[in-house]
Amino acid sequence: MDLEIRKLPLDIRSRLISLLELQDSWKKLMAMIPETLLLNNYKCDISHNNPAKYRSEHFHIIEDNSIKKRIFCSEILLREWGTSGRVRPAVGHLKYLLERAELFRAADYIAVDVLKQEPPPRPTKGPAAPVVINPDELEDPETKRIEKILDEINYPSSAIENINKLNSINTNLNYSTKKTMKVIPKIIISESPDMEETPPQFRLPVVIQNEKIKSESDLIKFSQESVSNSDNNANVPHLSSLLTDEASNNNIPAVIADITSSELSSETIASESNNSVVNRPNLSSLLNQSSDDSEPNFNLPAISELSLSSNSGSSTNFPALSQLIESENKSTSKNSRSCSSPLPNLSLNTPLPHFTYCDLATATNNFDETPLAQGGRFLGSGAFGKVYLGVGLTSKPVAVKKVILENVDVVRVDDMVTKQFRNEVEILSKYEHENLVALRGYSCDGDTYCLLYEYVPGGALKDRLQKHELIWTERLYIAIGTARAIAYLHTAYATPLIHRDIKTANILLDSNNKPKLCDFGLIKRALNQNTNTASTIFGTSAYMAPEAFRGDVSVRLDTFSFGVVLLELLTSMPPMDESREGVDLVTHIQENCQNGIKPLLDIAVGSWLANNINFGEKLFEIAMDCLKDKKERPTMTTICGILGDLVHKSL
């Protein structure tokens, strides 16, 4: 029982992996693993004090690595879990969790074959219950009568002979197949060029940072497109294959030699040289070919002309070779500035790609201010910038946030706006969650700073609430999705991340009304869970905890703000309203809802009742806990657990 699973013999480990791979059973096991294990107590359950060790993104990481490394997902799980934690998981822990997950085939194997114990008891009802076949049920009179009728049926002798003949043939065929087929042939499926995705409307260059440069340069792509578009492409060679053909001509021009050494990797040259070309002409014939050549098979311009400037009024559509080289050099530059900019030249520590300001202007129709509903690109604006729809920068549309600068001519590296921009780019590139708006890239080489996010088409939660468009069950799921996003920021790394601006305007909904938290310009790293340091006041006053006005910044600020969001979900009221006696929503609720949320509960979106539970009152209790004094507020991890139980009861 106390043998660590990482020390299991190879044969036992292999058998266990095969059992956990059946119907992705490893996922059920992974979902049951708690964060902390006890040394001599193998009973380990997930609770509020002992949350789950793995989140949804960890499942995706295992699946991705399984594909890349060609390893079973269950093997990756056992490796990771078996070597993590202060208390290493033992066979006893594994057996208990397998029983809890009702993976009884694997549990029986561990109990009987590994621990030499009796198999664990199974439930009497449900899918995991044992299937008992009573032989007496087969001896009833009706069954005997049917069997007697079947026995008395006389089949034609010809049919019986044909059946025996077919059985003999199949037996001989199977025997010969087993005898000769000692090795299963490997099937190689090549990717069809017809399966390529349609290119987006715009094909714009981007600056790639901290990524491995592609082994295939743009020059090779250019030569391949030239051949494929030619009417007589059977006799036209790849330009890259000409560069590596030593047999055709040893006098390679200097410009070609330079490209071979600087642009083309050895792997690319080797792969291109293996492609045979029918009737490949000598390189010298291409170099000396004039534009009025009478040969119909060659429409390719002289290679020497490619190295010259393309400013002349040539009818060919091929770009100059020097331009291709310059373009690729620019694409691999870390701080490329194709547009003049008064901004400081930043060197950011992030794997995100940099997009030039000129590219963003093209993708947003020069930052078109016409609303999207009217055919424009404008999505909305806030205190820190305007947001536009960008098309053609990536495979999917993106939301381009253009930061507002009061005086762009005096922006410096140590300015607050620059610090916030750097903060958002460098920190958020490390955080990925299904309920966080993903950051796709940035720009800092133009008139102002720009950030590129995934495009979320459903709009802001604030607008949807005031239109009474969301029923109460949808609001419940939005609450738990938002809570998970905040809890992820607080717990994903050892140092918590404080959002400091949680509000319904910063919660976007996708086409399925799934919430995604955005606008991280005010994020701040906390030294520990109880940070108490003076800081500049930021955020929206209606959502700010009382201690925030004293400069006391901690993760409990986000808990308070989430409580206000819950009040909006319950009432559909705006957080600030000058026309009511309690201007801010918290004060208004405290003055009118001393005995419950019923007086202000929005019943236009549903009764909030299901399974004899008033979910409106339950959410109100959670909201009021979030609005307590700082020390009494629950953590967002605790709130996620409570909301999870509430969602389960609503089903």
Image (spheres, grey):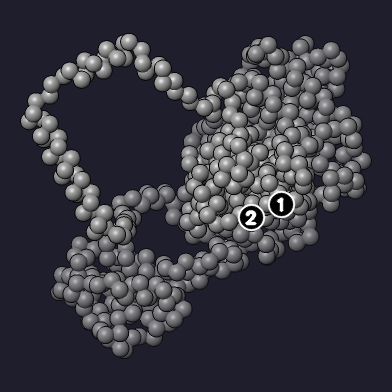
Q: Is residue 395 left or right of residue 100?
A: left
Residue at left offset 68%, top offset 11%: 612
Quickly name the residue at label 2: 6
Mark closer to the chain start, 1 or 2: 2
Secondary-structure class at tag 1: loop
Dot 1, crowdedness within 10 Å: few (<14), some or many (≥20)? Answer: many
Residue at left offset 87%, top offset 39%: 548
Give residue 187's position: percent from left, percent from top: 31, 56
Picture quadrant of residue 228: bottom left
Above or below, 291 relative to 108:
below
Between 75 and 601, the residue placed more toward the observer is 75
Q: Is residue 172 left or right of residue 385?
A: left
> Which residue type does callout 1 highlight?
Arg
Disc 1 vs disc 2: Cβ atoms closer than 8 Å? Answer: yes
Residue at left offset 27%, top offset 12%: 145
What is the residue that sits farthest to the left in this orientation?
A: 158
Give residue 430's position: percent from left, percent from top: 66, 53
Give residue 42's position: percent from left, percent from top: 72, 41
Give residue 82's position: percent from left, percent from top: 65, 52
Secondary-structure class at tag 2: helix
Residue at left offset 31%, top offset 11%: 142
User: Is residue 290 something one can see in this rendering?
Assistant: yes
Quickly name the residue at label 1: 88
Above or below, 310 relative to 436:
below
The circle on residue 170 is none
Picture quadrant of residue 150: top left
> Which residue type does callout 2 highlight?
Arg
CA separation, marks 1 and 2? Answer: 9 Å
Q: Is residue 387 left or right of residue 151?
A: right
Between 28 and 606, the residue placed more toward the observer is 28
What is the residue that sits farthest to the bottom in this orientation?
A: 251
